[in-house]
Amino acid sequence: MATPCNVVVLISGGGSNLQALMDSIGTGDVPARITAVLSNRADAYGLRRAEQAGIETVVLDHKAYEGREAFDAALIQAIDARGADLVVLAGFMRILSAGFVRHYEGRLLNIHPSLLPKHKGLHTHQRVLEAGEAEHGCSVHFVTEELDGGPLVVQAVIPVRPDDTPESLAQRVHVQEHLIYPLAVRWFAEGRLRLGVAGAELDGEPLPASGRSIRH
Ligand code: GAR
């Protein structure tokens, strides 16, 4: 059997996306293994999820470092010590330095709760409702130096209903996140997904600018 893809997951919170990844990899049909889960917060519930699954956890408190560069250097050291082929940001709520992003170019994925490039940053569900948009969703993308930017891999699109609230949207978007993140990680682990010069490629073909679209 080919060597599995070593994945390191970075979290800051509940870790429901981490759980979806662990469940997907746990089925045995994704050629990947999660070697460690890193968090910048010791109270992140996702750490408990990882422990329950027997995965190594590491806490690096950003407040203990003098500035972003020093924290990111420690993060790089911790990740590289675990031999990561792929680094997965799963609700990791820290802005990463250019040096960090460059270090993991082509092997750093993020998930964001909006149809990027719309609604980068926080409070995406609220902002979609305020803008009166008909559609919302989530995006997996390769990370570049731009916050919540970078070539898109896959998006799930859901309709916004007249009675939606930020909470109801968050819940439906989360369900979609738990489908598209494991899918993107599977593609990467299978060697089907890569970052080419012009953007993300799947099976050697360029993906559209909005990535593979899954509509509901
Ligand atoms: C997810 O909704 C993810 O899209 C978002 O944080 C949440 C983490 O949930 N990420 C961002 O907003 C990144 N800009 P989880 O801890 O339950 O996986």
Image: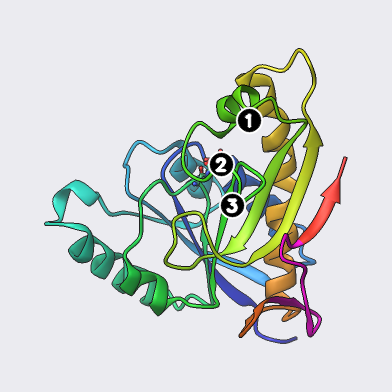
Magenta span:
200-211
Q: Earlier in the sequence, mark 1 or mark 3?
A: 3
**What is the distance, in whole Å, between disc 2 and disc 1 at their CAs?**
8 Å
State the residue at coordinates (47%, 37%): 122
Q: Residue 185 in the image: x percent, y percent?
A: 67, 65
Most distant residue in the left direction: 66
Cβ atoms at labels 2 and 1 below 8 Å apart:
yes
Type of amino acid under label 1: Val
Report the side of 1 relative to 119 (left or right). Answer: right
Numbered circle sitting on residue 128: 1
Q: Which residue is mark 3?
A: 111
Q: Nearer the viewer, residue 97 or 59?
A: 97
Type of amino acid under label 3: Ile
**Quarter of the picture holding the C terminus:** top right
Cβ atoms at labels 2 and 3 below 8 Å apart:
no
Q: Earlier in the sequence, mark 2 or mark 1?
A: 2
State the residue at coordinates (68%, 73%): 188
In the image, is residue 207 part of the stretch drawn in magenta?
yes
Q: Residues within 10 Å of mark 2 (few under 14, many from 20)?
A: some
**What is the distance, in whole Å, between disc 2 and disc 3 at their CAs?**
13 Å
Q: Which residue is mark 2?
A: 119
Tag count in the figure?
3
Most distant residue in the top direction: 163
